């Protein structure tokens, strides 16, 4: 048992002052343990030392009184001897008076008496009015005692002990069975069920009014008394005070009136709820009604699925139809209607039809939505009688957001049923539609609209709030661009996952389109290629022509970013021809797309000819036309004409309205738009180009994650020798001194992400051994590698096997070869969207990775290693040469010099490397080094290869040094 010194001293003081201590608490609060602890504490006191205990539940009251008399006479010589009565219970007032008289007689004889009983013994409490009282709250583990309990019982200190136990001693003791991150245990659940169940049993036996309150709180699980009052029920404050004093099995905060039950999400509470539902089904209906009234639909659904019959379910759905749709409970509504049958659904009324209509819209089941809307229209006269006015207003707002097309519109009713709410879900839906329409039609967020602080949602999903947040996210993406893309994308991906779990197809398609728009406007690579296509199809099925055109143009830009100029041009022309004049933003964005695709797919000569035919004296007030002409002049390199045109239309071109879309076009056009960037004022340059974080290619993003060591990750370095690391530290264990483990790790690292057959490994590593001997060696090498990597059977699997093949797990193993390949692909393939500065940085990063030639083992068949060593060295030099050219172009001589030195270090005899080195040395004014480099190169060619340098190399040297100086040197 855990020592409770402070409580012992408190009871001792009470006993010394009053002589009688009455301990009242339910089962599980440690009453008997307290009595035993106090008895031992008294016996250890040298001045007292005498204590006698009795279990009163096993004796009649007369037997208890006899025990008291005998004990008083036997202890007459002792100093304040302790008499303890455990589990005291009296049947009536007379027994209570008799026991009280005997207890007082013992007190007069010099004894200290401690009685232990449950809170239901009101007659005993009244009879012992002069005794000191110890309640259940005092028996709970106090905050200052938790440290002692944790150390004594070895409880995990990371657990939220008070939330799990409310300080009840038996529950705190059960925490010792919980370890690590696990937050529930069978023992704790059983103890919660026992403690709460005993309280319910005791209260129900006495028909106590508190029983109904506790049952209601257990069914609700958590919440506040304000919610219960909003739901039409009242819980008196006197009952809550009594509950917290006598039966503190609920965590309650009086200042906020919030409560939570023990084991709220555990099986123990589920079993208690099941017992309550069997005995009092009306309590479940009352709890469901409260939960629906305060929009806690998910909690209500859990109760309904577990404890309500299907007829009651459809009635509950009909009472709050839009609440179920807004919480994304379409599957529950559908299953309840199917299970109930047509007759029960008809009895439930039009509220159920309205729920079916709303759920069908968010799940994309438009045929069901049309059928439900048709029935509501036919029976419109009944709507005012069967559907609450607030619910109908929320339905009208929902109808406004979805547009009411394709035969899904709700009927128009009387003015009494057309009131507009000033807060809540209806307002959120109307704001979401207003913002979305303004963005699609005019490309800007309406004046006065701004994101507000999000209220805590009681459900896992809140469709109106999600749609409003999505509208603001779209506004941020279209107006702010890449600066908010990371934050918005993370939030959208979370919402997509939650909506997909509920199978809300229409909502998911909208979220996917906004997420794809975020990546598109930030210049990031495509992830969801069908996002705009699916959103366009959804808009088509909803007869939303405006949204359909917007998605058409967005898909065109996505096609353009993937190099599909023909598809992009087709979509731009399609949108431009069909968009009405009031869709100014869609038409302007389509014009920019058409211009960008034409420039990207047209030859330089034709672009120049088209620029020559422009009449620059004709001014325009259309921003899209002005930018189309600007980009054409920039691509044609007509700098003088471009400067004049930019000056004439400076106000339109620098306006904020179309700036993010222009920035996207300039990003994808790359060097074609370089002349325009030079004309943009320095204070606005950043607003017309995508930042480094936004324009980085997806493979470079992967590289950033790879370069930083992750916890538990193995990194194999093959350039400049074999080196294996974990968590950034080199592995130097005994197992790595065995050659076969190292060679096997290197061979598997060459093909990271794929598998090698065991037969191929045997042929390469032991070509001269017999098959049996080689197979044994392979098995030994695999075992040694697994041990060297520290792989455990139930841990991370670094080495994985499939059939007769073996490989390394790319999820937990990285190599410098993979990093090198990512960078080389970017530098050599000349991807669009990469600036010269970024390519130079990639080359410098490659120089950091390529620390030397690829590792080659000194045994076995090393043909594969040798071939790859030559390949990687050649690719490295090619990348350095490209980086040198780009550095010279950008006038970045320090980077060019650094790359030249790196190339010469690894391949000093390649002619193109020598030429680039001479060029860079000459630009730096280091002609002496040009002479030395060319002289050493000539010596190598004459004495080693017996040949002359290439004409291009010789001519470059002559141009640098001058013909006279060359003759003198020669």
Image: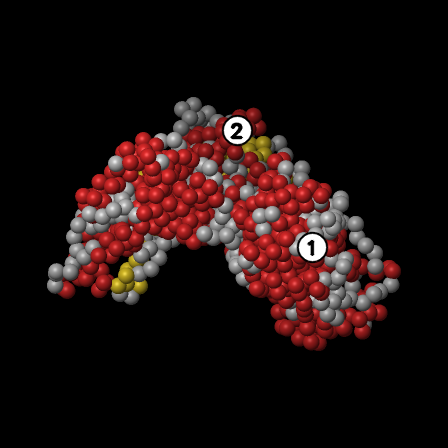
Tally of marks: 2
Quarter in which the N terminus is drawn:
top left
- Image position, residue 400 (x, y; %): 76, 60
Whether residue 927 is situated above or below residue 306 in the rendered picture: above
At a point 56% along the width and 59% down the height, the residue shown is: 602
Quadrant position of residue 147: top left
Q: Residues within 10 Å of mark 2 (few under 14, many from 20)?
A: few
Q: Camera-side residue: 499 or 282?
A: 499
Looking at the image, residue 834 sits to the left or right of residue 947; the answer is right
Residue 27 in percent (x, y) is at: 52, 46
Q: Which residue is mark 2?
A: 10
State the residue in front, 927 or 136: 927
Q: Provide residue 591's location: percent of width, then percent of height.
A: 67, 57
The answer to the question of whether label 1 and label 2 lie on touching residues, with beta carbons closer than 8 A, is: no
SS at badge 2: helix
Label 1 Cα neighbours within 10 Å, binned few <14 / some 14-19 / many ≥20: many
Q: Residue at x 30, y 36 (%)?
A: 966
At 28% from the left edge and 54% from the top edge, which residue is drawn?
A: 868
- Check disc 1 and report the residue beneath it: 588
Point out residue 906 in the picture as x, y percentages from the top left corner.
28, 43
**Residue in the picture at 50% in, 45% down:** 835
**Is the residue 72 above or below the residue 372 in the image?**
above
Task: Choose top left, top right, bottom left or bottom right for residue 433.
Answer: bottom right
Does any portion of residue 550 appear in the rendered image?
A: yes
């Amino acid at each position: 048992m855990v020592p409770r010194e402070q409580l012992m001293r408190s009871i001792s003081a009470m006993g010394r002052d009053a002589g009688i201590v009455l301990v009242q608490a339910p089962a599980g609060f440690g009453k008997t343990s307290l009595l035993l602890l106090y008895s031992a504490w008294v016996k250890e006191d040298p001045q007292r030392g005498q204590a006698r205990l009795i279990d009163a539940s096993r004796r009649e009251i007369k037997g208890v009184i006899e025990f008291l008399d005998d004990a008083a006479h036997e202890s007459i010589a002792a100093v304040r001897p302790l008499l303890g009565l455990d589990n005291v219970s009296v049947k009536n007032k007379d027994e209570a008076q008799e026991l009280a008289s005997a207890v007082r007689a013992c007190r007069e004889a010099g004894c200290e008496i401690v009685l232990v009983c449950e809170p239901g013994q009101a007659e005993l409490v009244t009879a012992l009015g002069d005794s000191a009282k110890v309640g259940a709250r005092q028996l709970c583990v106090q905050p200052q005692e938790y440290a002692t309990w944790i150390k004594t019982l070895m409880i995990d200190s990371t657990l939220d002990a008070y939330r799990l136990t409310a300080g009840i001693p038996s529950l705190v003791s059960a925490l010792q069975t919980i370890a690590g991150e696990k937050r529930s245990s069978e023992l704790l659940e059983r103890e919660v069920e026992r403690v709460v169940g005993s309280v319910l049993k005791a209260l129900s036996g006495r028909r106590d009014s508190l029983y109904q309150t506790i049952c209601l709180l257990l069914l609700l699980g958590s919440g506040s008394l304000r919610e219960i009052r909003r739901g039409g029920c009242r819980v008196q404050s006197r009952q809550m005070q009594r509950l917290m004093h006598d039966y503190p099995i609920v965590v309650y905060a009086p200042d906020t009136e919030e409560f939570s039950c023990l084991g709220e999400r555990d099986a123990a509470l589920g079993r208690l709820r099941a017992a309550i539902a069997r005995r009092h089904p009306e309590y479940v209906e009352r709890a469901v009604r409260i939960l629906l009234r305060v929009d806690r639909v998910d909690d209500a659904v859990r109760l309904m699925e577990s404890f309500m019959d299907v007829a009651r379910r459809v009635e509950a759905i009909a009472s709050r139809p839009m609440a179920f749709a807004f919480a994304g409970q379409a599957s529950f509504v559908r299953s309840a209607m199917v299970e109930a049958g047509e007759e029960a659904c008809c009895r439930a009324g039009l509220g159920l039809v309205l729920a079916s209509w709303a759920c069908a819209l968010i799940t994309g089941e438009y045929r069901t939505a049309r059928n439900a809307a048709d029935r509501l229209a036919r029976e419109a006269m009944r709507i005012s009688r069967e559907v609450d006015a607030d619910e109908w207003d929320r339905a009208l707002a929902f109808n406004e957001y979805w547009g009411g097309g394709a035969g899904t519109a709700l009927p128009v009713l009387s003015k009494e049923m057309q009131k507009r709410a000033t807060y809540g879900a209806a307002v959120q839906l109307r704001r979401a539609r207003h913002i979305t329409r303004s963005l699609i039609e005019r490309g800007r967020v309406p004046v006065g609209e701004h994101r507000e602080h999000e209220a805590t949602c009681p459900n896992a999903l809140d469709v109106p709030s999600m749609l409003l947040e999505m509208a603001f996210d779209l506004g941020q993406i279209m107006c702010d661009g890449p600066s908010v893309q990371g934050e918005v994308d993370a939030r959208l991906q979370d919402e997509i996952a939650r909506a997909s779990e509920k199978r809300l197809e229409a909502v998911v398609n909208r979220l996917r389109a906004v997420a794809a728009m975020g990546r598109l406007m930030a210049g990031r690579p495509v992830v969801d290629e069908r996002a705009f296509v699916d959103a366009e199809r959804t808009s088509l099925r909803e007869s939303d022509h405006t949204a359909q055109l917007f998605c058409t143009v967005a898909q065109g830009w996505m096609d353009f970013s993937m190099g599909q100029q023909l598809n992009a041009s087709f979509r731009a022309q399609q949108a431009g021809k069909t968009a009405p004049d009031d869709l100014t933003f869609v038409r302007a964005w389509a014009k920019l797309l058409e211009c960008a695709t034409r420039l990207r797919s047209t030859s330089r000569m034709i672009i120049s000819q088209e620029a020559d035919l422009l009449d620059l004296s004709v001014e325009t007030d259309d921003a899209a036309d002005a930018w189309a002409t600007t980009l054409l002049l920039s691509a044609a390199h007509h700098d003088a004409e471009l400067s004049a045109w930019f000056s004439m239309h400076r106000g339109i071109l620098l306006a904020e309205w179309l700036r993010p879309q222009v920035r996207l076009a300039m990003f994808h056009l790359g060097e074609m738009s370089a002349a325009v960037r030079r004309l943009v004022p320095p204070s606005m340059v950043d607003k017309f180009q995508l930042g480094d974080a936004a324009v980085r290619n997806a493979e470079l993003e992967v590289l950033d994650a790879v370069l930083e060591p992750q916890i538990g990750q193995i990194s194999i370095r093959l350039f400049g020798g074999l080196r294996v690391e974990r968590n950034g530290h080199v592995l130097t264990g005994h197992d790595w001194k065995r050659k076969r483990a190292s060679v096997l790790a290197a061979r598997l690292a060459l093909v990271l992400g794929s598998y090698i057959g065991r037969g191929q490994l045997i042929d390469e590593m032991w070509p001269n051994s017999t098959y049996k001997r080689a197979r044994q060696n392979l098995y030994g090498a695999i075992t040694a590698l697994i041990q060297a990597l520290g792989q455990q059977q139930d841990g991370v699997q670094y080495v994985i096997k499939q059939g007769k093949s073996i490989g390394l797990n790319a999820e937990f193993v990285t190599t410098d070869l993979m990093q090198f390949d990512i960078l080389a692909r970017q530098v050599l393939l000349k991807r669009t969207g990469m600036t010269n500065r970024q390519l130079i940085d990639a080359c410098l990063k490659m120089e950091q990775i390529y620390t030397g030639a690829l590792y080659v083992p000194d045994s076995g068949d090393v043909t594969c290693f040798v071939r790859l060593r030559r390949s990687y060295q050649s690719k490295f030099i090619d990348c350095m040469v490209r980086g040198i050219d780009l550095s010279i172009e950008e006038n970045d001589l320090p980077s060019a010099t650094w790359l030249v030195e790196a190339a010469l270090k690894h391949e000093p005899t390649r002619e193109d490397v020598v030429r680039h080195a001479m060029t860079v040395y000459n630009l730096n004014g280091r002609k002496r080094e040009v002479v030395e480099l060319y002289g050493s190169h000539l010596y190598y060619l004459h004495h080693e290869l017996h040949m002359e340098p290439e004409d291009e190399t010789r001519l470059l040297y002559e141009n640098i040094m001058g013909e006279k100086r060359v003759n003198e040197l020669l």
